Amino acid sequence: MASFERIEQIKTFLEKTPEDAFLNYALAIEYIALNKDDEAKSIFVKLIEVQPDYFATYYHLAKLYEREANDSKAIATYEAGINVTKRLGEKHALSELSAALEELTF
């Protein structure tokens, strides 16, 4: 299924459950696949505001900031994700976020 078809399908599901974290995350990922970074970023920012414990969001949002050469926002986003994953005990995600932050800053 092409990305634009998945986007329409996800949007249909979101009409019924607009606050579903996974569906919003999936929609943003589809936008990234189509190089629609602004749309993806908007979704990720809102997702972090309303569901800050959905930790997968932090990595991808920080990567978008890196692509924009906005290192300060990328660093802040990685650090926020690191704090969330530490609190939640999500060791694998913590490791990925820490490695990405280290790669960016060193």
Image: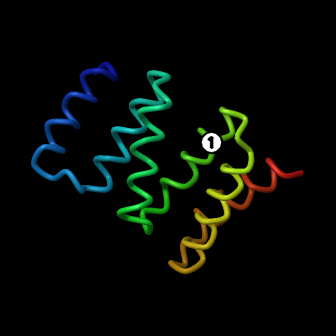
Q: Residue at position x 48%, y 53% from top?
A: 57
- In the displayed orientation, state which residue is furthest to the left: 16
Q: Which residue is mark 1?
A: 63
Left/right of residue 35 with respect to residue 50 in the rendered view: right
Above or below, 13 against 5 in this view is below
Count up the numbered dots.
1
User: What is the image's colouring?
Assistant: rainbow
For mark 1, give the secondary structure.
helix
Please state the horizontal and vertical placement of residue 7, each as a whole percent of the image. 27, 29
Above or below, 36 against 91 in this view is above
Above or below, 51 against 16 in this view is below
Q: Which residue is more in the foreground, 42 or 5?
A: 42
Give the quadrant of residue 89.
bottom right
- In the displayed orientation, state which residue is furthest to the right: 106
Q: Residues within 10 Å of mark 1 (few under 14, many from 20)?
A: many
Left/right of residue 76 with respect to residue 104 in the rendered view: left
Give the quadrant of residue 26.
top left
Q: Residue at position x 44%, y 48% from top?
A: 44
Q: Residue at position x 74%, y 45% from top?
A: 71
Please state the horizontal and vertical placement of residue 39, each as a whole percent of the image. 41, 33
Q: Which image quarter is the N terminus in? A: top left
Please state the horizontal and vertical placement of residue 92, each as a whole percent of the image. 60, 65
Please state the horizontal and vertical placement of residue 48, each as a whole percent of the image. 44, 59
* Kind of residue at badge 1: Lys
Q: Residue at position x 23%, y 37% from top?
A: 10
Left/right of residue 86 with respect to residue 47 in the rendered view: right
